[in-house]
Image: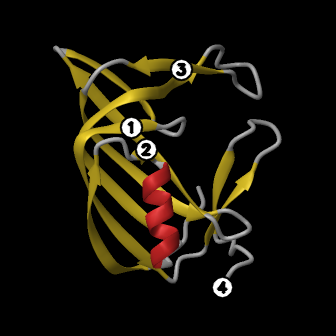
Amino acid sequence: MKATEGRVGRVFIIRLEDGDVVPECIERFAEEKGVHHGQAVLIGGLGPGQVVVGPRDSESMPPEPMLLPVDGAHEVVAVGVLAPTETGKPILHIHGALGRSGQTMTGCLRPGVETWVVAEVVLYEILNAKATRIPDERTGFSLLQPGVANSEP
């Protein structure tokens, strides 16, 4: 286990509108506001888009993602961690549970899912934390590395 310590800074309440793409719009907001590290909590409606629901084969590296389409409007609750790349670009790793008509799919929203009508986000800024997303050759993921400062101030 690796960890870093920080403290809560600003707290933003954000309304996403119809067609806004998650996680892209939250990352853009964070960049505009100078938020490097944070936690995002999202509720509302999403669809269309795609969700990563696991690797096809858990033993293969790098893993081949399984993608499921989000067809139609789904209710969503999601939580994510915002951290910068080595160049300072904030990247949101966010997983959610999406439900429709009694069925639920859970997965990573990284490929992008559009907001359906409205979604709400609370973004908690984390100050004084040292953590960077660094590309991992074995998995192909940009893994969070607590204790590692990025090159941006």
State whether residue 142 appears in this view: yes
Q: Quadrant of residue 147?
A: bottom right
Q: Is residue 122 left or right of residue 87?
A: left
Q: Are marks 2 and 1 in contact (CB under 8 Å)?
A: yes
Marker disc for residue 21:
2
Where does residue 79 sit, x and y in percent of width and height?
A: 35, 48
**70 is higher (above) or lower (below) than 8:** above
Where does residue 63 sit, x and y in percent of width and height?
A: 70, 25
Q: Are marks 1 and 4 in contact (CB under 8 Å)?
A: no
Q: Which residue is mark 3?
A: 67
Mark 3 and mark 2: Cα distance apart in space: 17 Å
Q: Counting other residues with Cα less than 10 Å from the Cα at mark 1, is it few (<14), some (14-19), or many (20 or more)?
A: many
The front one of 100 and 8 is: 100
Q: Which residue is mark 1?
A: 114
Task: Specify the quadrant that holds the N terminus.
Answer: bottom right
Amino acid, disc 1: Glu
Amino acid, disc 4: Pro
Q: Is residue 96 left or right of residue 99?
A: right
